[in-house]
Amino acid sequence: MSCTANGVADALRAAAVVMAEHRVELIELDRAIGDGDHGENMNRGFTAIVSSLDTMVPETPSAVLKLAATMLISKVGGAAGPLYGTAFLRASTAIESELDTAAVVAGLRAALEGVQARGKAVEGDKTMVDALIPAVAAAEQAAAEGADIAGVLTAASDAAGKGAESTVDLVARKGRASYLGERSAGHLDPGARSTALLLGALAEAAR
Ligand code: ADP
Ligand code: MG
Ligand code: MG
């Protein structure tokens, strides 16, 4: 089974709804260890994605992801815009034609590699990478065990949620939160939370 361009567009619309619903939560998480704009940034970016999909849905899954990347890079400032933009751009490049289970896994792996190439964060730095690394590992394992797209994304989403929770105890070594040093510990990283929310929305849309 594979996913169409319209299927990807619907999944991004579902992600936009989730970002809007969690806007205040993400703002509050970022207020504790950053500058308090992460919820606004994500909501603005996904609102822009939906507006442009309402005008026209590109023809292929890859082109839809590329459009999302363009919107995130142009409409979302700060750290998260370029990082999520790079993630979607790399995912779009990794998907050749058909978006089947293997392509979903390849897209997730490429997204992680893009975020790490751009932001230089490693596991344990208290960033979105702490949600993405376990998500990609879980997606690869689920695919190896024969899961379909929904199963792969559900595994990725569950692992991202646990990975995000693991950031609470960490001291930030990248991004704005790193300016707080030890005082960043005891708080959930907003970008790890938004990554878990995003994967949760994509998984839900695929089911
Ligand atoms: P800003 O910090 O510029 O206001 P946001 O608040 O939108 O940007 O996003 C903050 C999130 O970005 C952090 O919670 C973290 O997950 C992520 N982040 C910041 N720097 C990096 C990095 N170098 N690599 C990966 N993720 C990062
Ligand atoms: Mg911020
Ligand atoms: Mg900011």
Image (cartoon, grey):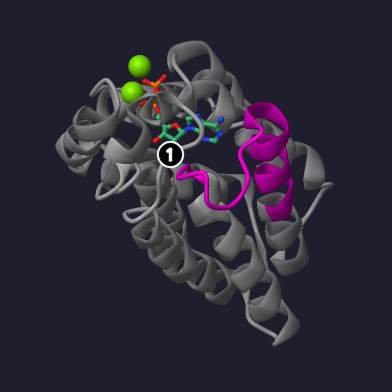
**Residue 138 sits above or below residue 76 on the image:** below
Give the residue at x 55% y 18%: 73
Residue lying furthest front in this view? 182
Tell me, yes or no, whether the highlighted magenta stretch contains residue 122: yes
Figure quadrant, ligand 1: top left
The kind of residue tagged 1 is Ala
In the figure, residue 49 lies in which quadrant?
top left
Residue 109 located left or right of residue 133: right
Work out whether residue 60 can be spotted: no
Q: Percent from the top left, x then y, of residue 127?
A: 47, 42
- Please tell me whether residue 28 is drawn above or below residue 97 in the rendered image: above
Residue lying at 55% horizontally and 76% vertically, measured from the top left: 151
Residue with the mark numbered 1: 172
Q: Is residue 60 left or right of residue 135?
A: right
- Numbered range of the magenta stretch: 109-128
Q: Position of residue 117 (x, y in %)?
A: 73, 33
